[in-house]
Image: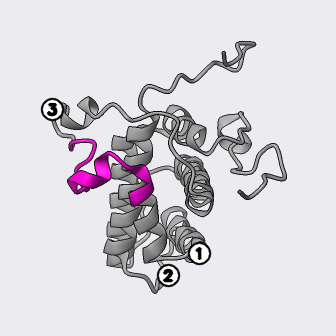
Amino acid sequence: MQALKTADPFHTGGWSLERTTDPYRVFALCFYHAGDIHEFRQWLLHIFLFIERFEGQTKVPPFTLCCAFMAIDSVIDAAHYIYENELEPHHQPDLSTVAAEPLPGQQQFASYFIEEEQVDIRKVIEQFFTYQTWDEWKSDLSLVLYNGVTEHAVGVELDEFSVWYYLMKLLEAAYIQSRGVVIYELCGFTEP
C-alpha cells in the first residue's frame, strides 16, 4: 500500500477547510462543501455544452466553478489512491437512494450506471482510470475549468461526451458511497 506523505494528500484543506487522509471521506466532503450531485450535473453539462459551441460560458460564476473543480480534483485524487491501493469501501452504500424517485426536474442518482456498478464503487473507479490515466484526467480537467472561467473559448482536443460521461459516473459513485457518512462541524466536534 502506498504511504501517504502529507496530512492533506487529496488537497481538501483549500476548499473544505478539513484535511483528511481517508479517500472515502473526500467523497463526503465534496458533496457537503462544494455542492450536491444535481448541481455538479448542471454545471458540468453547461460547461461541456459551451465547449462544444466554442463559446465562453457566463451563467455559472467563476468562483463557484473553481470551488467545484477543486473538489472534483480531490475526488479524482482519492479515486486514484483507491484504485492504486485496491482499497475496500468502509461501508456498503444505501441503494435505496438509488431506487428512490428523483425530485421533479432532477435525474435519478445513478442514472448513468449499469446495475453491477451500483454495488461496487471500485468497478466505476477502474473503468474511470481504464478510459484515461490520472495525468490525462488532470489535464482534461484543467482544460474544462479554463473554458468554464474564461470569456474566450479556446479549441479543446478532447472527446467532450466521454469525459463528461466518465466524470459523471465517478461523481455519482462517490455521491452514493458518501450517503450516510456523518460530516462533523469544524467548531470543536471530533469524529467518534
Q: Could you tell me if the residues under marks 3 and 1 are in contact, i.e. CB atoms within 8 Å?
A: no
Q: Residue at x 42, y 63 (%)?
A: 57
Residue at the spot 43% in from the left edge and 82% down from the top edge: 158
Given residues 150 and 110, the one toward you in this image is: 110
Q: Are marks 2 and 3 in contact (CB under 8 Å)?
A: no
Disc assigned to residue 101: 3
The amino acid type found where label 2 is placed reads Val
Residue 109 picture location, percent across and down: 27, 42
What amino acid is at disc 3? Glu
Q: Position of residue 85 (x, y in %)?
A: 62, 58
Kind of element beneath mark 1: helix
Colour scheme employed for the rendering of this structure: one colour
Q: Which residue matches tag 2? A: 154
* Marks 1, 2: nearer the viewer: 1
Who's the residue at 26% across and 47% down the image? 110
Sooner in the amino-acid sequence: mark 3 or mark 1: 3
Q: Position of residue 10 (x, y in %)?
A: 69, 50
**Mark closest to the chain's N terminus, 2 or 3:** 3
Using the image, determine if residue 88 lies above or below residue 126: above
Residue 114 drawn above or below residue 20: below
Work out which quarter of the rendered image holds the C terminus and state it: top right
Q: Nearer the viewer, residue 137 or 154?
A: 137
Residue 67 placement, left or right of 118? right
Please determine whether, in this image, residue 160 is positioned above or below residue 179. below
Q: Is residue 127 left or right of residue 27?
A: left
- Report the number of discs: 3
Specify the amino acid type for callout 1.
Ser
Whether residue 86 is visible to the viewer of this picture, yes or no, is yes
To which residue does mark 1 refer?
139
Q: Is residue 24 left or right of residue 191?
A: left
- How far, Cα to Cα, is label 1 from label 2? 15 Å
Element type at mark 2: loop
